[in-house]
Image (tube, grey):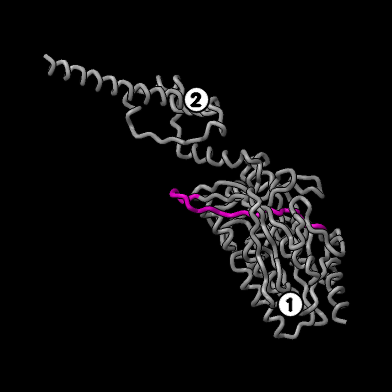
Amino acid sequence: MNYKRTILISLLIMLCLVAAFFSGYFFSVIRLMSWEVFVSKPAEDWFKPQNAIYFDRDQIDIEDIAAFNHVKNILENEYYKEVDFREAFSMAIKGLSAGLDDPYTAYYTPEEMKDYLEGVSGNYVGIGVSVHMDENFLLNVADVFANSPAKEAGIKKNDKIIKVDDEDVTAIREADLIVKKIKGEPNTKVKITIYRPDENRQIDLELERRYINISWIASDILDNKIGYIHIKQFDDDISKDFEQHLNALMSKGIKGLVIDLRDNPGGSYYQVIRIADRIVPKGLVVYTEDRGKNRHEQYSDERELEIPLSILINEYSASASEILAACVQDYGKGTLVGTKTFGKGLVQEIDMNFANGGGFKYTKARYFAPSGRSIHGEGVIPDIEVELNEEFKTTPIEDIPHERDTQLKVAIEEVMKKIK
C-alpha cells in the first residue's frame, strides 16, 4: 500500500511540475506577446523554436513591446497580402537607428552595404555626383564629376535632388537610401528631378547610368613654382596618393604649396591623420572623446612640411577636411583661406560583423583639434575669409579657371609672401 501511495505522490508531483513549467512558459509568452497574439496562434506554434529581442525594463516600456507585437499580428493575420517579414524587419532595424535623429548613424542591408563599399572605392554605376544632406534634409549636390552623365546633363553644385523616377524623396532623411534609388545597372535610364535654388525652379532630367571611376586627388604646378594638390575626399588610399603627389611636386622644385579642400565632405579618420602627420611637427594631431569621456589621442612624428603652405576651405569642407584644416591652423603651419567649414566634428565607424552581410555605420565619438576646440556645430574659421566669385558658386572646383578663382588667388598670395 505504501509503495502504491509513493508512486501516486510521485506522479502527482511530476504532474504539478509539468503544469508549473507550462504555466510559467505560457505566462511568459503571454506577457511578452500579449493575450491577443497568443490566442490568434494555433497551440502547436508555441512549441516551435522562437526568436526574441531583449530590452531591459528601464529601456523600453512593456506597452511599446506589446504595440510592436500588435502591429506584427495584424500584418500576419489581417493585412491584404502576404508580408515578407524579413524585408519588413530590416526596415525595423533601420528604424532603431533612425530614432536617434543622427543623420550619420544608419543600418545597411547586405545589398546597401555592397553599394556603400563600391562608392567608397570610387568605382560604381551611377550618374556621377557626390551628395550630402543639407540643413533641411534635402539631398544636395556637393560635386559633379568630370565626364559623367550628370555633368553632361547640366546638373550643378547646390542643386537639390527632390525626385527619382517621379518618386518624391524629400521625406527620406538618409542620403544613402536616395543614392541607392539613383544607382542601378549600366546603360539603364533614371529620371531625376532637381530643384535649383538660385533659379527657383524644378528641372526634370533623364540620365543614363554609367560606370563611374573617380580619382579623389589631382595635382599641378602653378605659376612661380607653387604646387597645387586638390583632395576631393579622404578615401582608403588617399594618404599614400597624397605622398606620391607631394613627392612628385617636390622633385620638380616647388617653393610653396596650396592644398584645396573645398567641397571635400571628409572620409577616413585614419587617412587624414597620416596626411596631417606629413605636414605638422611632432605633437598631437587630433583626439576623440567617447560617451564615457575616454580620450584617444593621435600624434605626428618629427617629419614635417618645410615649405610655405595655404589651405583652401569652404562651407562644404567637412569632417576629415576640418581635422586637417584645424590641425594646420593650430600649429601655424599654413594659412587657411576661404569660408567657414561645415562643422561636423563627429567620428563614425562601420561595424560589418553581421551574419547577414549587412553593416552599421554609427557615430562613436566627438573629435577635438590639438588646441582642444570642438569643431562640431562650429566649423573652422579661415585665417583670411574670401568669398568665391558669385558666377562660380555652382561650378565644380576643378572647372573654375585658376586665373578667375578669387579664393585660390589669395591662397597663392599668402604662399608668395612667405617665400619672399
Viewer-proximal residue, 21 or 309?
Answer: 21
Examine the image and state in which quarter residue 260 appears.
Answer: bottom right
Q: Position of residue 390 (x, y in %)?
A: 86, 58
Q: Is residue 222 magenta?
A: no
Examine the image and state in which quarter residue 335 appears.
Answer: bottom right
Q: Position of residue 202 (x, y in %)?
A: 74, 45
Residue stretch in magenta: 340-358
Viewer-proximal residue, 381 or 78?
Answer: 381
In primary-sequence order, the first of circles 1 and 2 is 2
**Residue at horizontal 74 percent and vertical 43 percent from the top:** 136
**Residue at horizontal 73 percent and vertical 74 percent from the top:** 281
On screen, residue 138 versus residue 180, left or right, reads right
Q: Position of residue 321 (x, y in %)?
A: 71, 62
Q: Position of residue 115 (x, y in %)?
A: 54, 54
Asked whether residue 271 appears in the rendered view, the answer is: yes
- Image quarter where the N terminus lies is top left
Looking at the rendered structure, the kind of residue marked 1 is Leu
Q: Is residue 324 above or below residue 158?
A: below
Looking at the rendered structure, the kind of residue marked 2 is His
Q: Main secondary structure of the magenta part?
A: loop
Q: Kindly identify which residue carries mark 2.
A: 70
Q: Kindly identify which residue carries mark 1.
A: 305
- Image quarter where the C terminus lies is bottom right
